[in-house]
Image (cartoon, rainbow, N blue to C red):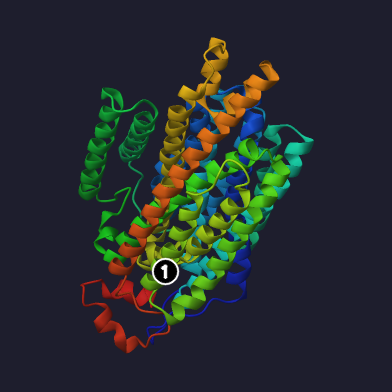
Amino acid sequence: MAVTASGVAPGAGRREWIGLAVLTLPTLLLSLDLNVLYLALPQLSAALAPDAAQLLWIMDIYGFMIAGFLVTMGTLGDRIGRRRLLMIGAAAFGVASVIAAYSTSAEMLIATRALLGVAGATLMPATLSLISNMFRDARQRTTAIGLWMSCFMIGAIVGPLVGGVLLESFWWGAVFLLGVPVMVLLLVAAPLLLPEYRNPEAGRVDLFSVLLSLATVLPFVYGLKELAKDGVGARPVLAMVAGVAVGVAFVARQRRLDSPLLDVRLFTDRTFSAALGVMLLGGATIGGVALLFAQYAQLVEGLSPLRAGLWMLPYAVSMLIGSMLAPVLARRFAPGHVVAGGMAIAAVGFALLSRVGAADGLGLAVTGLVIVYLGFGPGAVLGTDLIIGAAPPERAGSASSMSETSTELGVALGVAVLGSVGTAVYRGEIAPALPGDLPARVREAAGESLAGASAVTGQLPAQTGDALLEAARAAFTSGFNVAGTVSAVLAVILAVLSALLLRRVRPADEPAGAAPAALADGTDEASASARG
């Protein structure tokens, strides 16, 4: 879709808007897959008996593999065609979902979750890059991304309800089968409604760069997990140092290649880089507290999976509202101010989470999350739009992959770091509260996690079991409180950074004549025009 002679991008027509409905299907699916798995954790733990580290990997490996392969898949889509890549990913995701549903051990589920991550990595950059190509008008693109992001929240709304019904009627693996009909529908509709785009000048995928990107992400996150679990030690520190070192080598190689896996020239745009940072840290705050709340609702408050899913609806709706407000606000106010205001609101919600108690704290927790997600919605939409708008059409796949990499890696890091923080606080508080006459096996299970404590209390005398469960719930809630405090601090930092680093990006409705002032910091003029 070319720019007209007047320099204004033409508006999208009926086909593009119908095609957008098709592009929301993978977003809906990935949201369903993530949220229903949170609800399935207690049943999954009882069936497969994973230890605390395995349980974290079941959650983490999906996001890590997505983050590791997104850059590769973005470049691959530029080369072979973005619609073709979308369909390949849809088919692979459907097959991997069936395998995951019938996993018979924690190790098998971790492996299949990794396969789901690789398949999922093909979906998001393909959808975002297609949106970038189909909606060249800046206002329409912001609206399209807002609708695309809203479908993610619709998945968050529908997922807990459907997942809760499935978990009360079937086994835990049924939650993975939700993705199969969605992928079948996508495979049927995509060839009929979506145009194909590819960059004819895209080079070959550098396999060594793929290995370097994975060797950067996984060791670093492993080191973070081990530090939170066992404290400072040689192994986790060396793993993190190795990840950073490989990351430096990865960037250096991209600078030398004629057809790099990651186009590092995009980082010279300050708005692009700042938006990536906001998406990364914002995703970390959201990912950690979402996991902890799902466990809090079921294991501390004692809710069934269906009732826990119902309590997730209010904050999913609040982010849907925030996402839909983003395009409207961005027309009148500078995007940096909108994002900063949203993160300041989110900080208030996180602060409320730090005050949640082990008894009768559900209402306060849900209120806090409603505020958090309402504030996070505009930043998610506008951050994505700024990243996509900064890239030329032929590099849309690369920019889309980096946008999704920052978000997915942020969520995965949040689950790993805040989950590990919560676990560390739990273990520190539960150890002195354990009765001295507990059997060694019971003591070990209760000391690992709240899920472990809940599983073994039935093996104890009623009074002892009740006392142990009360102590375990109090210890877990303390970890939840600490995670809320850490997230509140991060949200305040993000609010300040957003206001400072994005301050020169003008509102969409500001006259084009204001462009020179917006470019006083040296921002690339073409990128600014794409955003305005």
Using the image, determine if residue 528 lies above or below residue 100. Answer: below
Location of residue 257 in the rendering, given as x and y in whole percent from the top left corner: 24, 47
Using the image, determine if residue 171 lies above or below residue 15. Answer: above
Location of residue 512 in the rendering, given as x and y in whole percent from the top left corner: 34, 86
- Any part of residue 196 in sight: no
Question: In percent of the image, x 48 and y 65: which residue is there?
Answer: 381
Question: In percent of the image, x 26 and y 41: which residue is there?
Answer: 247
Q: In this view, does 20 lie to the left or right of 253?
A: right
Q: Is residue 482 left or right of residue 217?
A: right
Location of residue 173 in the rendering, given as x and y in whole percent from the top left corner: 68, 33
Residue type, mark 1 in image: Gly
Location of residue 73 in the rendering, given as x and y in whole percent from the top left corner: 44, 47
Question: In percent of the image, x 33 and y 40: which residue is there?
Answer: 213
Q: Callout 1: few (<14), some (14-19), or many (20+) C-alpha neighbours within 10 Å?
A: many
Residue tagged 1: 341
Q: How many marks?
A: 1
- Farthest residue to the front: give it: 463
Q: In which quarter of the image is the C terminus?
A: bottom left
Question: In percent of the image, x 58 and y 57: which residue is there?
Answer: 367
